[in-house]
Image (cartoon, grey):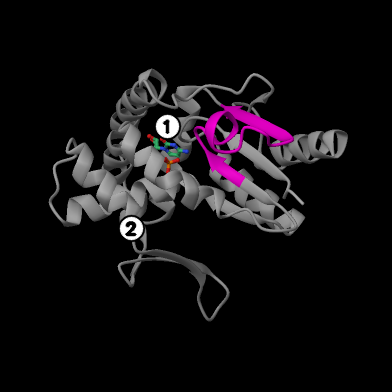
Amino acid sequence: MSVPVITIDGPGGSGKGTVSRLLAERLGWSFLDSGALYRLVALAALRRELPLDDADALAELARGLDVRFELDGAGESRTLLDGEVVASELRTEACGEAASRVAAIPAVREALLARQRDFQSPPGLVADGRDMGTVVFPHAPLKIFLTASREERARRRFKQLKEQGLSANLQNLLRELAERDRRDSERAVAPLRPAEDALEVDSTDMGIDAVLTEIVQAARQRG
Ligand code: C5P
């Protein structure tokens, strides 16, 4: 029996990470943060001082990536890279920027494909990313494309980074988001775009609860 998948794609800062996590929790489904996989490849590459344009070396790294997602004693999720817990360094803009560079390499994307599909387990999966609905889970019964204006997305990132005690500058964030949007949308392989059958939700003036309600309603209609 195939496992139902809800895909949530969109640009950085659209709120899809938070929405996907909450949706998975509410449904009792598994959750795939595909951006974290690209960030982990980037982080492993930076640590090994691999050039971010060495496609062969990066694809090899992605194929052998030693990563585990697990719950700690308090029930909080944590990520281990090469057996060591990684925390805030995965969420920095530098890591996001490096992730978007390695993500433009077709062999890296190919190397991560099976790993992403392995997240499917009953009763269902919520998959968050850029190409979940177009490439990784093209048969998903519900596909969401979540957007927000670039200014609003930069404000959200700023708030998020501050809350995590990280330094942030709004103008720099805006510039970095614009650059990342451009790279993600213009790359030749799996560019950021809505699947033809995706429901587009603009969250610029919506709170997380309103977005979640809209998606749950759509899931009921299609389920
Ligand atoms: O979503 P997040 O900001 O963590 O993603 C980091 C980068 O990874 C994105 O800018 C994008 O380039 C890449 N990515 C991707 N495909 C995905 C998820 C993330 O190319 N499915």
Local crowd size for mark 1, using a 10 Å CA cut-off: few (<14), some (14–19), many (≥20): many
Residue, x 21% and y 50% (percent of image)? Answer: 45
Residue, x 67% and y 34% (percent of image)? Answer: 139
Q: In this orientation, does residue 167 appear?
A: no
5 in magenta: no
Tell me the SS state at disc 1: helix
Residue, x 35% and y 48% (percent of image)? Answer: 39
Tell me the SS state at disc 2: loop
Q: In this orientation, does residue 37 appear?
A: yes
Q: Mark 2: is the Cβ under 8 angstroms from ligand 1?
A: no
What separation in Å lies between label 1 and label 2 (alpha carbons)? 30 Å
128 in magenta: yes
Please identify the quadrant where the C terminus is shown: top right
Identify whether 207 is placed above or below 29. above
Q: Which mark is residue 65?
A: 2
Of mark 1 and mark 2, the one earlier in the sequence is 2
Residue 137: image x %, image y %? 60, 38
Q: Which residue is mark 1?
A: 154
Amino acid on which disc 1 is placed: Ala
Q: Mark 1: is the Cβ under 8 angstroms from ligand 1?
A: no
Local crowd size for mark 2, using a 10 Å CA cut-off: few (<14), some (14–19), many (≥20): some
Determine whether, in the image, residue 156 is placed left or right of residue 206.
Answer: left
Determine whether, in the image, residue 95 is placed left or right of residue 217.
Answer: left
- Marks 1, 2: nearer the viewer: 2
Residue, x 31% and y 24% (percent of image)? Answer: 179
Identify whether 50 is placed above or below 146. below
Segment tinted magenta in the rendering: 127-147
Residue 155: image x %, image y %? 45, 34
Q: Nearer the viewer, residue 101 or 202?
A: 101
